[in-house]
Image (tube, rainbow, N blue to C red):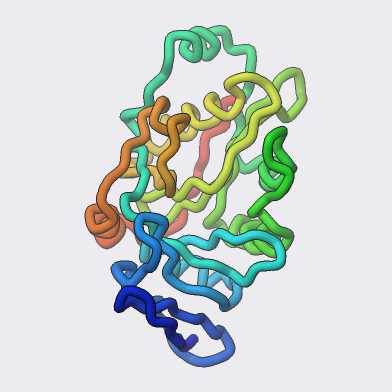
Amino acid sequence: MTYGNQNQSNKKLYWVKDNLLSNSFPEVSQSLREPDGLLAIGGELTESRLLEAYQKGIFPWFNAGQPILWWSPDPRCILEPNQINVSRSLGKKLKQNLYQVSFNKCFQRVIENCAAPRKIINETWITNEMKLAYIGLHQSGYAHSVETWFEGELIGGLYGIALGKVFFGESMFSRKTDASKIALVSLTEQLANKGFKLIDCQVHSPHLQSLGAKPIQREHFTQYLHAYCTLKKTTDWQHNG
């Protein structure tokens, strides 16, 4: 992998070429378009490239027809597993035990549901190329799904990547009210029990904030990664239903 550059405000846009030898992305401080954090363009979604990116606080995000775009926003949105905010209504629903939760039961169905068009958005950034890449990471033991069920029907869930003691959340979906939130609550319980330090939520939103997520400076986020993000895989997910 080598990098070309495009000058803008004394910074460079790096071009990734996976057919040439190299092992490193540029430093995330080189990203353009703060706070969005566009860092690099091009390359391939190989397992080694994705794992390298996540360990450095970089993730791919692009639409169909675009080259791969690599991002490292500042600030970064995170959720500490033991700091999730459970509203009164959500807590009541959890106590009713109407829904069941599973882990890694149907990863492909979860990512396909996350990729489906939403009511207000017809396009999706989860392209076929992205789906295949993350299904591959799941088969390798790095990507995981959480599923919410009601009467045998898949009604919500989420997926992401677990590296060391950091979980990188990618996307979630709901077919019934609070279905994805219930999946997230179950995930945080699992991660807290396993000693995870944080969940990367990537970009701040009012919805994530309502669940307890907060922004931190990218420099602080990368310090977490240096301390806790390794290639160690997470096993023994406990099913709740």
Q: Nearer the viewer, residue 35 or 200?
A: 35
Residue 143 position in % (x across, y down): 56, 53
Quarter residue 211 falls in: top left
Badge count: 0
Quarter residue 27 falls in: bottom left
Give above or below for 13 relative to 141: below
Q: Nearer the viewer, residue 236 or 138?
A: 138
Q: Nearer the viewer, residue 211 or 138?
A: 211
Which residue is painted at 50% across and 52% down in the image? 161
Residue 16 position in % (x across, y down): 51, 81
Which residue is painted at 61% across and 24% down in the image? 179
Query: Can residue 100 be seen at all in this image of the molecule?
Result: yes
Residue 106 position in % (x across, y down): 70, 42
- In the orientation shown, which residue stands out farthest toward the bottom? 20
Residue 86 position in % (x across, y down): 41, 19
In the rendered view, does 118 fall on the left or right side of 199?
right
Quarter residue 128 falls in: bottom right
- In the orientation shown, which residue stands out farthest toward the front? 9
Which residue is painted at 54% across and 67% down in the image? 69
Quadrant for the C terminus, please.
Answer: top right
Which residue is painted at 58% across and 12% down in the image? 97
Query: Can residue 139 be seen at all in this image of the molecule?
Result: no
